[in-house]
Amino acid sequence: MSPSVARRILTSNAVIALAAMGVLGYALVELEFGESDPPAIAGDGTLSAAEALSLVQANDMEPLVADAVAAAKKRAYLAEKRAKEAARKKAEWYKKNKAKIDAKIAAEKLAKLPNPTAEQNLDAGEKLNAAKGWQACWPALKILWTKESNWNERADNPWSDAYGIPQALPGSKMASAGPNWETNATTQIVWGLSYIGARYGDPCKAWGFWQRNHWY
């Protein structure tokens, strides 16, 4: 073989070798710094062991980033804890004050309903009293319930919780005369007359008892 041919062969082999080394070096750099694209995932979502290892190594998180994520998770946990504690305290407060809250709501609803005048209630009382056959005792009944409630169907005694025109105690007793006992004067008067008849016989005797005791 001539010296010139030998030089050409050696030169060609050296070029090929250098090219191969360059490609290999580039590949190593890509793998080292994670700049290459991650391996494609199979259509069914599975990964080979090599592909999984490559993905894991290519997605190493910096400690500072991890610390920031942990701090955010801690803040979220503490915020959730505070919110749950506030909700628990609110529920306990509501349970403790439910009766007062319900009473306030009921009173507000009651205040919005039509409120007949004392004169209208007096007129109904006189008619119902006459229906019981107690016409002669109307003056006694009129003054008795004027003393008790001024013929106000929403009169609520703050000291005893007596309620309504006849000052039933408790007011819910008048539910036996009708479910609208809180606002309906006729229902209250019917109940009150029934009470007077059962306990005293008529309004005249009930008024006489009140004068001696200041209650009936």
Image (spheres, helix red, strand yellow):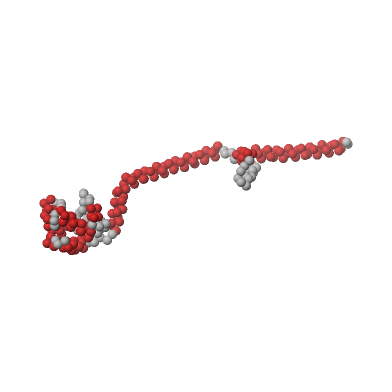
The answer to whether residue 135 is left or right of residue 102 is left
Q: Is residue 54 visible?
A: no
Q: Quadrant of residue 37?
A: top right
Nearer to me, 104 or 4: 104
Q: Residue at x 63, y 39 (%)?
A: 49
The answer to whether residue 2 is left or right of residue 168 is right
Q: Residue at x 20, y 59 (%)?
A: 190
Q: Residue at x 14, y 54 (%)?
A: 200
Q: Position of residue 46 (x, y in %)?
A: 61, 43
Say which quadrant the N terminus sits in: top right
Q: Quadrant of residue 57?
A: top right
Nearer to me, 29 or 202: 202
Q: Position of residue 71 (x, y in %)?
A: 49, 39
Identity of the residue furthest to the right in this view: 2
The answer to whether residue 135 is left or right of residue 40 is left
Q: Is residue 88 visible?
A: yes
